Amino acid sequence: MKDIATVATTDYILNKYNLKALKKFGQNFLIDSNVVTKIVHSQHIDHNTCVIEIGPGIGAMTQILQRFAGQVISYEIDTRFEPVYREFLDYPNVEIIFGDFLEVDIATKVDELKKEYEQVLVVANIPYYITTRIIEKIILSGAKVDAMLLMVQKEVALKFSGDYKSPLTLLIDYLGKSEYLFTVSKNVFNPRPHIDSAILRITISREYDKKLYELLEVAFRQRRKTIFNNLKEEYGDARHYLEEAGIKENMRCDQLDISDYLNLLKVIGEKQ
């Protein structure tokens, strides 16, 4: 069967099924099979791997993933693609689920898959307006995924893999790591977006810590305030906690790293 991720096959699909990319879903279809293959090969995937794919679109990535993975479960919100899947993705190891991924109980789903597969990955080509929400959903659910391979806007990938600090990026620093793998040119999409994309890999090697995230959210409540001013309403003895943790009370939340917050969390836990 022909690769979907080519100009000719994509045009064939769009014309045959009278489809076009919808802005409300942030759709851009990959038209370079070499890029798709590079994305898939950037993470070890074999028959002991189940891939949870978010937003398969017309199936360019799904088609390549199923050649390597034991199973591919794809969540798609746009039901217009159903006839495309019948023609191009009729494989025994591919399951398409129509619905909003943000409403899925992902932690329970991953627990079920872990009984059968050694590795569970999330692979997604996601629009910028929903990127953080999807990453938050997966991370904060405590889902025991091994890694996420995400195609996002280049600026977003640089933010997550760089020095920018937020409750989510610091939590990821604790759970594993974020890596900027490579840039994906805007020229390999139909329609062509205004900016380049990038592949961001988030690896998870620890269990989610709810208390740590709660502390981070309080600490970042107002970024320009000092750490003491952000903490004092939630933690009555904030000044003493900061002193015990060796943190100056006039520092701002983004001047601390994850080790500082872990130390602070330990002090709070011991004193309460």
Image (spheres, rainbow, N blue to C red):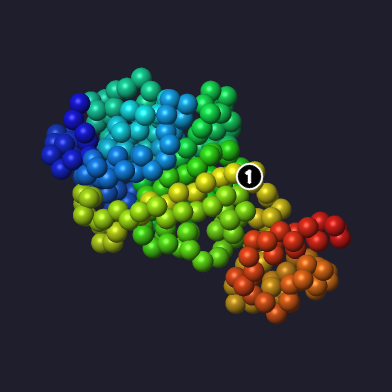
At 64% across and 69% down in the image, what residue appears? 256
Q: Nearer the viewer, residue 208 or 67?
A: 67
Residue 261's x, y, as percent?
69, 62
Residue 72 lies in quadrant = top left
Q: Residues within 10 Å of mark 1 (few under 14, many from 20)?
A: few
Residue 94's x, y, as percent?
37, 26
Q: Indicate the secondary structure of the residue bearing disc 1.
A: loop
Q: Residue furthest right?
A: 271
At 67% across and 77% down in the image, what residue appears? 251
Q: What residue type is labelled 1?
A: Arg
Q: Which residue lies furthest to the bottom in this view?
A: 250
Residue 247's x, y, as percent?
74, 72
- Relative to 224, is 221 above or below? above
Residue 183 lies in quadrant = bottom left
Q: Name the residue tied to disc 1.
A: 206
**The N terminus lies in quadrant:** top left
- Relative to 22, is 6 above or below? above
- Could you tell me if residue 178 is visible in this image? yes
Q: In this view, does 192 lie to the left or right of 271?
A: left
At 26% across and 55% down in the image, what residue appears? 185
